[in-house]
Image: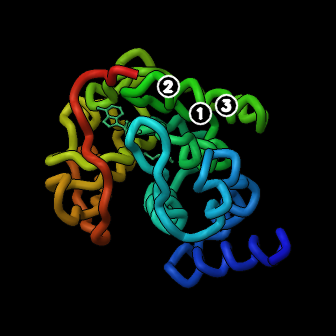
Amino acid sequence: MTDAERKMQFLFALRSRGVTDGRVLTAMEKIDRGPFVKGIFADRAYEDMPLPIACGQTISQPSVVGLMTQALNVQPRDKVLEVGTGSGYQAAILSQLARRVYTVDRHQRLVQEARAVFQALDLTNITAFTADGSHGLADQAPFDRIIVTAAAEDPPGPLLAQLKIGGIMVVPVGQSDAVQSLIQVKRTDKGYDYNELRPVRFVPLLEGVGKE
Ligand code: SAH
């Protein structure tokens, strides 16, 4: 298969799984998933599958990245927080749609590797930190959009608090060993509206920072 055919197939898979937002598709066409997948799985980067990355974590399935990004409804002036940098792929997609992206992971190694890819791709509006993202990022709060790419039992309180009124958060909620529900939370001036989107499977949101 040629690169062009592989790309066509990649975009077709996204569309057929419900990623229809033109801006999201354009961002996913532009950001090549290849550099975010390393080692023996590199040649499977264009398949619509989650793949293993360092520190026992996973890069999400492209169609799930697309659906979550779509549910986040990012606007060009938005400041976005991502909890769970992993490979950096989701943050790179967000960087095409938002003004600024802050992304945090509890594994320093993943943050360092993701930073190197952001630099290589010249994605200068992403800032990556090593931290326990369940506390959010108080220094940069509040955020227009928050995306959590690890499963929490409930949407973490500090993240709800760091969402602007009118803001949107997308978070997988449920036990880590079972199928979870992807939830879209909208903050209004009266409180929070919750909308259940679809079943998903994510690695767990863990406390504290990792050993590597
Ligand atoms: N968005 C990533 C995939 C994330 S996998 C991508 O596009 O590749 C989930 C990530 O969440 C893992 O890297 C894991 O280390 C991280 N994570 C889990 N609990 C966390 C926490 N409390 N704070 C920050 N990151 C966390």
Q: Amino acid at mark 1?
A: Ala
Q: Quadrant of ligand 1?
A: top left
| Residue drawn 21% across the image and 46% down it | 152
Q: Nearer the viewer, mark 2 or mark 3?
A: 2
Quarter the C terminus occupies = top left
- Alpha-carbon neighbours of circle 1 within 10 Å: few (<14), some, or many (≥20)? many
| Residue drawn 41% across the image and 35% down it | 55
Q: Which residue in the rendered view is the most extreme toward the bottom?
A: 16
Residue 92: image location, x then y, percent: 63, 44
Q: Is residue 179 left or right of residue 118?
A: left
Is label 1's Cβ within 8 Å of ligand 1? yes
Q: Secondary structure at mark 1?
A: helix
Is 193 rendered above or below residue 205?
A: below
Q: Amino acid at mark 2?
A: Arg
Residue 109: mark: 2
The span from disc 2 to disc 1 (Cα, nearest Å) is: 9 Å
The residue at which mark 1 appears reads as: 114
Image quadrant of residue 181? bottom left
The residue at which mark 3 appears reads as: 125
Q: Nearer the viewer, mark 3 or mark 1?
A: 1
Tell which circle, 3 or 1, labels the residue nearer the N-terminal end.
1
